Amino acid sequence: MVFSSLLFIYLFLPLNLAVYLFFAKNMEQKNIVMLVFSLVFYAWGGPVYVLLLVSMAGISWMGALLIQKQGKPSARKLWLFVTCGLMLLLLGIFKYTGFFLGTFHALFGVPSVIPEIALPIGISFYTFQLLSYVTDVYRKEVRAQRRYRMLLLYASLFHQC
């Protein structure tokens, strides 16, 4: 969904604001409204890619909790590298697989078929946002978020895009 589309301006955003302002009574309900609308926003570009966002938030959530739990600096660093490595691997698959396979095909003639992988909406944005969160937990600048859905809301809030 494009921010300048008529569907977004005249239906999605007003509906989001109306539900948030008039039906959500407390902060917990308001957060749930924002999470649901944010996931719908990302699903608009391809419902399957919401699974990618949810998975990457899950990886970051678990990684941050493991980093915070560890006492030894070497164990904290290991979990930082594992978490960041997984996140960057997923980003690399979606952003660069076509480029590398196309280059390899141009040089060596294989593979014969290059898969076209669609780029999920906002993948770079939320990947680097989650990477900075995990790094902040590692540096002890913030505490790891105990509730997964709050981290998912942080990563997926479409207003940030």
Image: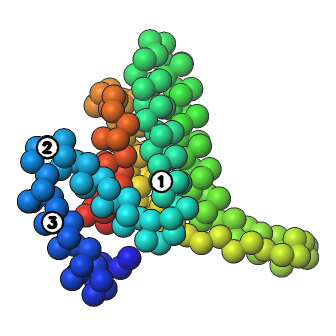
Q: Earlier in the sequence, mark 2 or mark 3?
A: 3
- Three-letter residue code for mark 2: Met
- Three-letter residue code for mark 3: Leu
- Report the quarter where the C terminus lies: bottom left
Disc 2/disc 3 C-alpha distance (Å) = 14 Å
Left or right of residue 122: residue 150: left
Which residue is at the front of the view, 37 or 114?
37
Residue that badge 3 annotates: 17
Choose top left, top right, bottom left or bottom right for residue 16: bottom left
From the viewer's perspective, is the residue at label 1 or at label 3 nearer? 3
Residue that badge 1 annotates: 53
Q: How many marks?
A: 3
Q: Where 62 sits versus 70, above or below?
A: below
Q: Residue at x 47, y 24 (%)?
A: 66
- Three-letter residue code for mark 1: Leu
From the viewer's perspective, is the residue at label 1 or at label 2 nearer? 2
Residue 124 placed where, x, y %? 46, 61
Secondary structure found at label 2: helix
Secondary structure found at label 1: helix
Disc 1/disc 3 C-alpha distance (Å) = 23 Å
Do labels 2 and 3 touch, CB within 8 Å? no
Q: Where 38 sits versus 56, above or below?
A: below
Q: Residue at x 48, y 40 (%)?
A: 58
